Image (tube, rainbow, N blue to C red):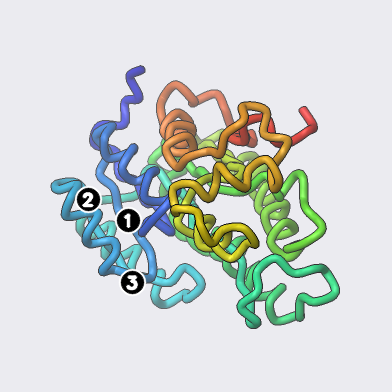
Amino acid sequence: MDTQLNGRTALVTGASQGIGEAIARALHAEGAKVALLARSEAKLAAITDALGERALAVGADVTNEESLAQALATIEAKLGPVDILVNNAGGLRSSTGELFRPFEDIPDADWLETWEFNVLSVVRVTRALAPAMAERGWGRIINISSESGIQPDAVALEYASAKSALNILTKGISKTYASRGVVANVVSPAYVDTPILRDLLAQQEGAEKLLPDELAAHFQPALRPNIAVGRPGNPEDVAAAVVFLASERASFITGTNLRVDGGSVMAI
């Protein structure tokens, strides 16, 4: 498939590992110039060193307006205006260290911090970049959500509700910019074998004798029995969906949620 991404500039947030890293690598492989943004510039540098030309590591915190503004200025100065924005940074915030808590145990501060990380950070980055995309008449905004935004569990409702809000936000952004050549879509993964997931699974009962590579597959039948394809996802599955949505082949797709979930979500 000719994606026609050669020479485009992409920004991937939360790109230091897992899904974000896979997305950055896939876009780079299609010829795009890629800025990888995360809080740990050291982790990013190892990736960009391996990628070589057209890859830029930028250390910044998407929840800090000043840090983000400086990062965006650096990216434009070194790679040019951003054409493709992938808002991948996100996750649970917990003041107790426990992530999957029941509703009654989640304090207000953790609700606010989780929403800041998953929703307001996307607002902040998109608000900074989308108007210029619209002025140039071409742009791609791809927000990484979660199956939890559609099919929540009884725990981690602060995260599920934030991802649901992200889905609605993306739909509104798609209507704001579609007539000016900028399309916006969501990709919703489910149970993807990433370093973060492995860390969480390593805390589960029965994980003591398992190798890290075995954790996701071992716990998948119990934790995500609805995955119809019968295996965990991998970061490259998500990256492939992002590359498609970033490409010219997806120019008539906007306001859509592309679920990369192996059939886990029960609704159509």
The quarter of the picture where the N terminus appears is: top left
Q: Which is nearer the eye, 174 or 240? A: 240
Residue kind at label 2, given as amino acid type: Ala
How many numbered discs, if any? 3
Q: Residue furthest right?
A: 104
Q: Earlier in the sequence, mark 1 or mark 2?
A: 1
Asked whether the residues under the numbered discs 1 and 2 touch, taking CB atoms below 8 Å apart as contact, a structural biologist would say yes
Q: Which sits earlier in the primary sequence, circle 1 or circle 3?
A: 1
Residue occupied by mark 3: 70
Q: What secondary structure is marked by label 2?
A: strand
**Mark 2 crowd level (few <14, some 14–19, many ≥20, 10 Å Cα):** many
Q: Residue at x 24, y 34 (%)?
A: 31
**Residue at coordinates 62% horizontally, 36% vertically from top-left?**
261
The x, y position of residue 160, in whole percent, is 72, 56
N-terminal of the pair, mark 2 or mark 3, is 2
Say what secondary structure mark 1 lies in.
strand
Dot label at residue 258: none
Mark 1 surroundings within 10 Å by alpha-carbon count, few (fewer than 14), some (14 through 19), many (20 or more): many
At numbered mark 3, what does the secondary structure look like: helix, strand or loop? helix
Residue at the far front in the pictured view: 209
Q: Quadrant of the C terminus?
A: top right
Percent coordinates x, y for residue 247 in the rendering: 41, 28
Is 213 on the left-hand or right-hand side of 29?
right
The residue carrying mark 2 is: 55
Nearer to us in this view, 186 or 139: 186
Q: Is residue 211 above or below residue 94?
A: above
> Which kind of residue does numbered mark 3 sit on?
Gln
Residue 163 on image: x %, y %: 67, 54
Q: Nearer the viewer, residue 239 or 82?
A: 239
Examine the rendering and report whether any part of residue 123 can be seen: no
Q: Which label sits on residue 36?
A: 1
Where on the picture, by quarter, is residue 25? top left
